[in-house]
Image (cartoon, rainbow, N blue to C red):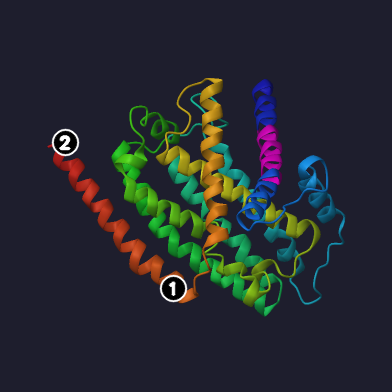
């Protein structure tokens, strides 16, 4: 029993440390890609080719003074970034990295993702409310409305995959793509899932909750030091998680327990993250009414009709 507990703790710590390192270098990867797209130089001073820049940025944030506004609700102000970061880490507990490499393999993994993922909005809206700032509060409200709106479409898209693969287990969904990827057979679902992933992670062109132009960074405008770092880490951990989830649901994941298979899996995730950065560098931000229109009047009806059509086809084939 004790050995199992120790093994579980070691696995958990290795996942947390691994995610923190990957998040740090994802920020460098984003800055380098953005610089290349915009024909300028990215970070290249701290360390060889700027490889130590994420460590320097993290150290800078931790060493800064933590400032809590006088009018803020101090307890909730402190809890909000911790909640956001904790939720982003919890999602990784059931993520299959390969056929046998996982922390917890539960049969209803998809439901776990939908349930825990929906809790992330609480950290953002609590941060906006506890800051006692009109800009932060408006950013929190925007984020709550946006995430709830696109979670409905995301749920229908995932429901389509569940009906198609006949399982809620992420590992079984991944193994079901041994012969053909879901992106080929369920291309419209893959496109809609990618759009909703952009909206769920507050990435451009759906970064309305933290729009710098009008909200001065939105819900985290009053945060500094460790609080801001936790929001930052949570956001990028969610980006990496959504990229990994897209690869598992639509691009085959990692089917074989071999080094080559793991390398290919990592390359797929890196390419998916690249598309997130590419979209940020090329597309302008939506207006808020356009954002809501796309969520409720375009994606929701299309995803619902696509789900009904897939279920109808499956039932017809069974009969």
Question: Residue 96: which numbered mark, if any?
Answer: none
Q: Is residue 99 magenta?
A: no
To which quarter of the image does residue 172 belong?
A: top left
Q: Is residue 22 left or right of residue 290?
A: right
Q: Look at the image and tell me in which quarter the C terminus lies.
A: top left
Q: Give the image location of residue 197, x and y in percent.
A: 48, 54
Q: Is residue 203 visible?
A: no
The structure residue drawn at horizontal position 47% and vertical position 63%, both measured from the top left corner, is 148
Identify residue for label 2: 318
Question: Residue 290: which numbered mark, if any?
Answer: 1
Query: Which residue lies most toward the bottom here?
Result: 134
Q: In this picture, which residue range is highlighted in magenta?
A: 12-24
Q: Look at the image and tell me in which quarter the N terminus lies.
A: top right
The structure residue drawn at horizontal position 53% and vertical position 23%, both measured from the top left corner, is 260
Q: Residues within 10 Å of mark 2 (few under 14, many from 20)?
A: few
Q: Is residue 191 left or right of residue 261?
A: left
Callout 1 secondary element: helix
Q: Give the image location of residue 12, x and y in percent.
A: 66, 34
Q: Is residue 165 visible?
A: yes
Residue 130 or residue 95, whichever sits in front: 95
Going from N to C along the chain, the mark reached first, 1 or 2, is 1
| Residue 28 sits above or below residue 252 on the image | below
């Amino acid at each position: 029993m004790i050995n199992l507990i120790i093994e579980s703790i070691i696995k958990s710590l290795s996942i947390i440390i691994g995610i923190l390192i990957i998040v740090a270098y994802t920020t460098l990867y984003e800055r380098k890609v953005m610089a290349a797209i915009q024909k300028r130089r990215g970070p290249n001073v701290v360390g060889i080719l700027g490889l130590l820049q994420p460590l320097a940025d993290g150290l800078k944030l931790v060493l800064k003074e933590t400032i809590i506004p006088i009018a803020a609700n101090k307890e909730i102000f402190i809890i909000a970034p911790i909640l956001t970061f904790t939720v982003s880490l919890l999602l990784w507990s059931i993520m299959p990295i390969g056929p046998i490499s996982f922390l917890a393999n539960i049969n209803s993994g998809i439901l776990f993702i939908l349930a825990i993922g929906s809790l992330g909005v609480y950290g953002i809206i609590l941060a906006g409310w506890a800051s006692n700032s009109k800009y932060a509060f408006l950013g929190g409200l925007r984020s709550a409305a946006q995430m709830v709106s696109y979670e409905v479409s995301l749920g229908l898209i995932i429901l389509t995959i569940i009906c198609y693969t006949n399982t809620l287990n992420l590992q079984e969904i991944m193994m079901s793509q041994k012969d053909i990827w879901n992106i080929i057979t369920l291309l419209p679902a893959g496109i809609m899932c990618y759009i909703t992933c952009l909206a769920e992670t507050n990435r451009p062109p759906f970064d309305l909750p933290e729009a710098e132009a009008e909200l001065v960074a939105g819900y985290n405008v009053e945060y500094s030091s460790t609080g801001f770092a936790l929001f930052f880490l949570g956001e990028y951990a969610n980006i990496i998680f959504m990229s990994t989830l897209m690869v598992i649901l639509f691009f085959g994941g990692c089917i074989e327990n071999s080094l080559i298979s793991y390398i290919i899996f990592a390359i797929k995730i890196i390419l998916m993250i690249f598309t997130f950065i590419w979209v940020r560098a090329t597309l302008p931000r939506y207006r808020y009414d356009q954002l809501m229109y796309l969520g409720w009047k375009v994606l929701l009806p299309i995803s619902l009709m696509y789900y009904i059509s897939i279920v109808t086809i499956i039932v017809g084939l069974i009969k």
